[in-house]
Image (cartoon, rainbow, N blue to C red):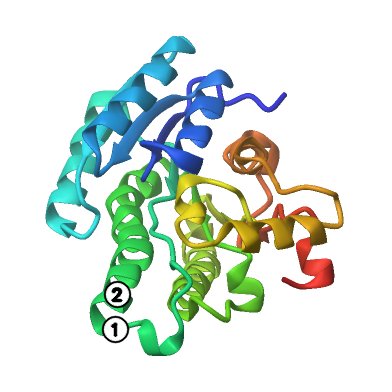
Amino acid sequence: MTSLLGSKVLITGSGGGLGRSHAVLMAERGADIVVHDIKREGAAETAEMVRAKGRRAEVIICDVRHIADFQRDIREASVRIGGIDVLVNNAGVGGKRRSIEEIDEAVFDEMFDIQVKGAFFATQAVVPAMKEKRNGRIINISSIYAMGGNANASHYAAAKSAISGLTKSWARELAPYNIKVNAVAPGFIVTEMTKGSNTPQNIAERSARMPLGRFVEPQEISYAVAWLASAETAMISGQVISPNAGETIVGY
């Protein structure tokens, strides 16, 4: 089992869903976690789950769109927990199956502000200390839709494609400082966010097409995240890994 013993990990958007799954698994493997979310109750629940694994948890409650506050909170939490070794840029919002005509400026801006700007400025907040230590891991959460597009949420696919582009660019820029940057691009997972973006019929049809016979479970995405955060991936950077049950083999 991959060890993260003693690692200090900040996971944005970890008050529920995939972010909570990452937090709990990484705590199980020895990491202390900074739990971030916009919702206080969800963040508190995740923090208690981390502590139940015997690890330390700090909490940040902040909207990633409030850049100055967000960066200040990250720096303060970093001091409290003893530095950030790993950043997981997980905060996001679903596309809700909107056609081109249904995506107005406010919806488009929200998508890019949370997915892209949130990841960019969280990374900006942790990079100086990582550079000073000459060590760090940044793991961005992209999507299968960055690989093949999405006919009914092009703004979501575009934002996740931007995340993949940031991953490769940061990997180049930060390599001299021994900071590895990778992305995990999940296939379809049934979470509260994806339920809000898909009908039950759509979910059933996609499940039937999976080459491996079922959807990926949230913890199986977390396995990839934990692995990329570990010492086992010392020579892996600039990569996008997609646990998707073989969905890209047949198309989606």
Residue 35 left/right relative to 141: left
Sort mark 2 into few (<14), some (14-19) or many (20+) by Cα contacts within 10 Å: some
Q: Classify mark 2: helix, strand or loop.
A: helix
Residue at 64 percent across and 61 percent down: it is 201
Q: Is residue 20 positioned above or below 47 on the image?
A: below
Distance, label 2 to label 1, CA atoms, is 5 Å
In the picture, the quarter occupied by the N terminus is top right
Q: Are marks 2 and 1 in contact (CB under 8 Å)?
A: yes
Q: Depth check: 100 or 225 in front?
A: 100
Q: Classify mark 1: helix, strand or loop.
A: loop
Residue at 50 percent across and 26 percent down: it is 24
Number of marks: 2
Q: Position of residue 236 (x, y in %)?
A: 67, 52
Q: Position of residue 200 (x, y in %)?
A: 59, 56
Residue 223 left/right relative to 61: right
In this figure, which residue is indicated by the disc labeled 1? 104
Q: Position of residue 78 (x, y in %)?
A: 27, 34
Residue at 49 percent across and 13 percent down: it is 53
Q: Is residue 180 positioned above or below 51 on the image?
A: below
